Amino acid sequence: MSLSVGVDVGGTKIAAGVVDEKGAIIARTRRDTPSKDAPAIVEAIVSVTRELAAEHDVEIVGVGSAGFIDAGRSRVMFAPNLAWRDLPLRDQVAAATGLPVVVENDANAAAWAEFRFGAAEDVNDMVLLTIGTGVGGAVVLDGAMYRGANGIAGELGHLRIVPDGQYCGCGLRGCLEAYASGSALVRNARAAASGSAAFPGSPAMLLDMAGGRAEGITGPMVTEAAQKGDPLAVHLMAELGGWLGAAMGSLVSVFDPAVFVIGGGVADAGPLLLDPAEDAMRRSITGGTHRPHATVRLATLGNDAGIVGAADLART
Ligand SMILES: [Zn+2]
């Protein structure tokens, strides 16, 4: 059976695994990410690959990284959180390990894993949205990863949904990420708890969870409070879902996907996020009563998606 290594380069850890043709991880290892030290991050990728390749007969290596990856799947053009600028990552890792290497955007890798082995394995056309600190996106069309002319398609977190709206981490204004990310959720929860903005419901439960300090409120606290039925937390989650659904309605007009797969930490809220998102999507689709609708599903592979997808995409 053909084996490949998948490496998931995250901001805090580098996770890697040996993956078989059915998407099963048969061995795994990890390192802490040497943050902000660009050459040390490459060294860590080489180190996990060598460790796994020493024990298994590996044919190829897929490295999934945040940032813009070129159309040749070889260079990281820009990765703001990893201090990489125009880095020839494929050639560096290949030279150090003696193995063929393919570099892939991390959201593309996660989407591919869900498409091949997870929540969207029964369809040909899907859109992934990951709701974490930011909003990631990726598109699979007609059974193939959609990369665009320059390799950087699918940056769905930066769809502009509000002209002149909230500032986004990317420097532009009104991006989906500024409204539908975990960061936006926490920003709104803290504003509600500090009284700097008016929201329906009392912040008492959230403040209690955060030891009385508005700045202590975290995303998982909002999820937990919503699951306990706290009206403010339920409202904040539904509002996020509403922005997500509005964006999905526009994406339906562009891609006509069979399925949206929603992943990332905020997706732990399950129906508290997905139901409002699906409602908003249905209201946002042109001619919505005269066409089949995309279904909305939770991602099923969790943190393994990055490893499995990078490994499997390397074979394609
Ligand atoms: Zn943006």
Image (cartoon, grey):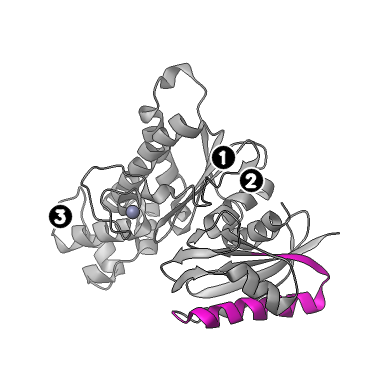
Quadrant of ligand 1: it is bottom left
Q: Residue 300 versus residue 140: which sits nearer the camera?
A: 140
299 above or below 207? above
Secondary structure category for the residue under label 1? strand
Q: Residues within 10 Å of mark 1 (few under 14, many from 20)?
A: many
The residue tagged 3 is: 197
Q: CA distance from mark 1 to mark 3?
A: 37 Å
Residue at 66%, 81% (x, y): give it.
Answer: 47
Q: Residue 120 versus residue 50: which sits nearer the camera?
A: 50
Instruction: Tell me which label, 1 or 2, sits earlier in the chain.
Output: 2
Q: Residues within 10 Å of mark 3 (few under 14, many from 20)?
A: few
The residue tagged 2 is: 115
CB-based contact (under 8 Å), mark 1 and mark 2: yes
Question: Which numbered dot is residue 126?
Answer: 1
Instruction: Tell me which label, 2 or 3, sits earlier in the chain.
Output: 2
Q: CA distance from mark 1 to mark 2?
A: 7 Å
Q: Which residues make up the magenta segment? A: 36-62
Q: CA distance from mark 2 to mark 3?
A: 40 Å
Question: Is 172 included in the stretch rendered in magenta?
Answer: no
207 above or below 113? below
* Left or right of 273 on screen, residue 53: right
Q: Position of residue 7 (x, y in %)?
A: 63, 68
Determine the image quadrant of residue 197.
bottom left
Q: Amino acid at mark 3?
A: Ala
Instruction: Tell me which label, 1 or 3, sits earlier in the chain.
Output: 1
Q: Residue 306 versus residue 41: which sits nearer the camera?
A: 41
Residue at the extreme top of the image, as rendered:
290
